Image (tube, rainbow, N blue to C red):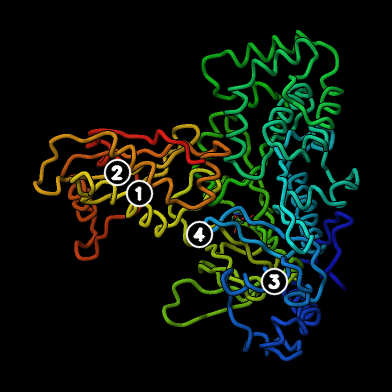
Amino acid sequence: MNLCSDLSDKVDEKVLEDLTFNVKEIQANVLEEILTLNANTEYLWRFLHGSSDKELFKKNVPITDYEDVKIFIERVANGEPFDVISGKSITGFILSSGTSGGKQKMFPCNNKYLENVKFIYNYRSHVISKHIDGLERGKGMVFSFCTQGKKTPSGLLASTGTTSFLKSDYFKNRPPYWHWSYTSPDEVILCSDNKQSMYCHLLCGIIQRDEVVKVGASFVSSLVRAIIFLENYWREICTNIRYGRLSDWITDISVRGSVSKILGEPNPELADLIENECKQKSWEGIIPRIWPKTKYIESVATGQMAQHVPTLEFYSNKLPLISPSYVSSETMFGINMNPLCTPQDVSYTFMPNLSYFEFLLVDAGDKVEIVDLVDVKLGCYYEPLVTNHSGLHRYRMGDILEVTGFYNNAPQFRFVRRGNMALSVHLEITTDDELLNAVTHAKMVLESSNLMLVDFTSYADISTTPGHYVFYWELKGKYNNDIAEIDSNVLVECCYMVEKSLNNLYKDYRSKDGSIGALEIRVVQQGTFDALMESFITRGGSSTQYKTPICIKSSEALMILEKRVQARFFTDKSLS
Ligand code: AMP
């Protein structure tokens, strides 16, 4: 039985059963396939000298992170032959959303990656349709977006995983049984001006409101953004519907053509109905109010997205929220086989046909303990290592997962956290080091005005839209303890300096895309950080072990800080 490749043309329950029963055999076949393919690449040759022996692979091939493989990937992107890194031809590059350095990582990609995406889309829809009836008769309002991408010197395009898939023939020629019927025409999905596509996704979704059975976006934060966008644009959308005329600023010709067809004749009744809903003071339950036949929401709500779930639940009146899959730019991992469970209970069943997976035991001390997919233990925490078909070998993902159970023989994992993430309000990842570095820069501004930073911490405030970073700063005078007066210009400049020193992805979301709001510094009374430490000690912590956390998540700690806020400052300069 060859279950390793090209399974995904027919959606068949038996395939899922076979895959999850024969995990060991399939993983061995996948590794063999990859090693045979890549044995003669420059990268692997150094360790295996042309052998595709699996034991030798485990013995000789080192664990890698992005810095180790970057140089090889860049050489291919710059025009060297693909066999520097991969035995299978590279057809493009995938840009990941964010990294600790804030620069996008770039991974080689070929058809196997796109087939894996197709497989995941297919089977997660299949699993969901086993739990929710009547989906085949309705449509999905799905906020999918493409980015422009960029051409590498090799002539190959680099773009996000979603864009690569949506622009490929796999999406274009999707067969009707793929359960993918969208309210938006392909022109809207493929448009790289995301403001035009967001507007048209909403407009098309509202016009076909009676057919919408699912509302979706890759991540919950994107869905919340879509609702906020609607708050700003519903009047204009209603005017378009009332007069049957699309706003002039929708200038993309193919989008205009396809959306105008859906818009059709003037429809004042629908415009009145939507206006009535949107005019109401509270937007609680707005999703089922506008789209009353929605059966569920499909959007990843685990990991850094968990913080946005309460906001979404407010808008959705707690419609079932399904986190369908765990995927990345490096590879696809698995599917949520129990889609109707609560967001806190979501686990993803790894599919053994997608890549070769190994697992690095977390907190194993000095020992490096690596196990195969079939050998992970219930309750243990691991970081996945990926060996894929396009040139990554034993690549550290940086995600921390916990084994929660097994589906047949396939392990299921709960997403615990991104290994190095401290703060995030959207899709960016800001690490402890980056926060420290940013505050160090801002401190120079502070000290030039005879103030000193006694201590600080930070917090991701998503009660505002868009969410923003908050820093709590305790200050003292450089020459005497008291601060006579705080010069607001200095603190505003500090806010700017912190933002300027954060990573590029933060700055992009903040300046170009508006998904992150202006950074805030809240100056707290003197003694606040002592009070914070005392509360830690009274809860059983040790004073010798205590370090002020660089970011705060606990509500008790936040209360201690909030009670002592004396003044608030925001940046007033744009970052671009
Ligand atoms: P990217 O490569 O930009 O697509 O980002 C991939 C990363 O997003 C993964 O390594 C995870 O950290 C995160 N991610 C993807 N899917 C999930 C999920 N279902 N739950 C939590 N985090 C996820």
Nearer to me, 377 or 268: 268
Residue ID for mark 3 = 75
Whole-angstrom CA distance, mark 1 to mark 3, is: 41 Å
Question: From the image, which quarter does the N terminus lie in?
Answer: bottom right
Position of residue 271 relative to residue 564, above or below, is: above
Front tag of 1 and 3: 3
Q: Along the horizontal axis of the image, is 361 left or right of 256? A: left
Q: Decide: marks 4, 2 in contact (CB < 8 A)?
A: no
Instruction: Name the residue: 58% across, 34% down.
Output: 224
Mark 1 or 3, nearer chain start: 3
Whole-angstrom CA distance, mark 4 to mark 2, is: 23 Å
Nearer to me, 251 or 19: 251
Residue ID for mark 4 = 100
Label 2 SS: strand
Residue ID for mark 2 = 472
* Image region (quadrant) for ligand 1: bottom right
